[in-house]
Amino acid sequence: MKTKISSPEFLEGFLRTAAGYDSDEGNPRVKEIVHRLLSDLCKAIDDLDITVDEFWHGANYLLRLGQAHETALLVAGLGLEHILDVREDELDENAGLAKDGATPRTIEGPLYVAGAPVVEGEAQLDDGTDTESDLMHLSGKVVDAVTGEVIPNATVEVWHCNSKGNYSFFDQSQSDFNMRRTIKTDNGQYTARSIVPSGYSVPPGNPTEQLLTLLGRHGSRPAHIHFFVHAPGYRHLTTQINLSDDPFCHDDFAYATRDELIVDAVEVNDPEKIAAAKMKGPYKELVFDFSLTKAADSDQEVRSSRARAAL
């Protein structure tokens, strides 16, 4: 039989005290957020008749999630990171900032590492040790979404996984910053040579997979490549492209797929093209241009302040 924590009057007064409203000290914004979250949690305990054992099972799960360094992974897997993007899109539209032709944002994911080597125009992303995937030639330009003109001083940060779905830094078997570079464009043009990344799944047996299994969901992502794209005076862009031939392209557990960000990998076997592209053999060609919008203020020129790994 369901029960209630107590009278609404008692609960409201108690939660306001727990959130610090009885004190003039502290941060008003934090108090507001904590009070709302506590109120919603207590309502869920009542409405769902959550038991003591269920509550502590959930609390202990959060502990294990943090110990496994999977908080950001689960945020993506539960769609919360996608919802943040959707909300930002709606805020842009309401403010009249959405522009036709601008490259859509999508999730950053948990695997960026700060400090990747900076190169001019062209980058060799991989160290050559992973021979289990096709070679890849990625290129494009960065343009103004309104005028279509090239943005000459743009920077493209790029990172992706190897043929086994593993990222350098998190996978200690890889060299430092393998498949990670910061490319200062050559008059808006960028080129990256590497291998075609694979799709991957969340770590087996870890907290994220355990919860997804209970939800009846898979934890797989399609092959994709991450980007930060920025230039003075323009809004910072966090995005990624998905490879169209991956079976999970439209079934990404992290909800990052957007139609405008799906790219075909074109097979190139012509010896002259291989030589012109400075490739070591036949390769898959990917072409993707980024369109940026002007920033309304300097805060829009930089990425969010979330915690990130650094070497």
Image: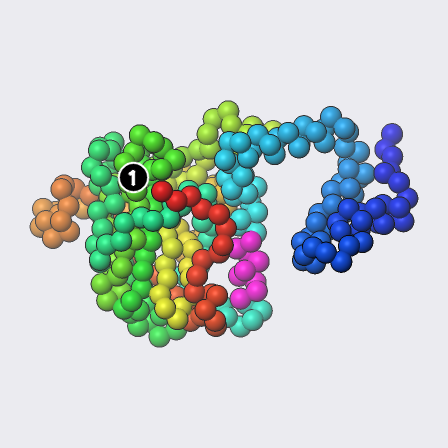
Relative placement, left or right, of 85 versus 179 is right
Question: How far across and down, in percent of the image, does residue 84 sit?
Answer: 56, 53
Q: What residue does disc 1 label?
A: 176
Total numbered circles: 1
Quadrant in which the C terminus is drawn? top left
Q: How is the image coloured?
A: rainbow
Question: How far across and down, in percent of the image, does residue 3 sit?
Answer: 87, 34
Compared with 192, 97 (above or below) is below
Instruction: Inspect the image, locate mark 1, and give the three-letter code of the amino acid beneath it.
Output: Asp
Of residue 262 and residue 190, the one placed in the foreground of this image is: 190
- Give residue 229's quadrant in the image: bottom left
Can residue 116 be seen at all in this image of the molecule?
yes
> What are the residue bounds of the magenta stretch?
84-92
Of residue 260 and residue 89, the one placed in the foreground of this image is: 89
Question: How far across and down, in percent of the image, does residue 31 sit?
Answer: 71, 53
Q: Residue at x 42, y 59 (%)?
A: 237
As for residue 86 lying within the magenta part, the answer is yes
Quadrant in which the N terminus is drawn? top right
Q: Residue at x 44, y 33 (%)?
A: 201
Main SS, magenta region, reads: helix
- Give residue 144's quadrant in the image: bottom left
As for residue 182 lying within the magenta part, the answer is no
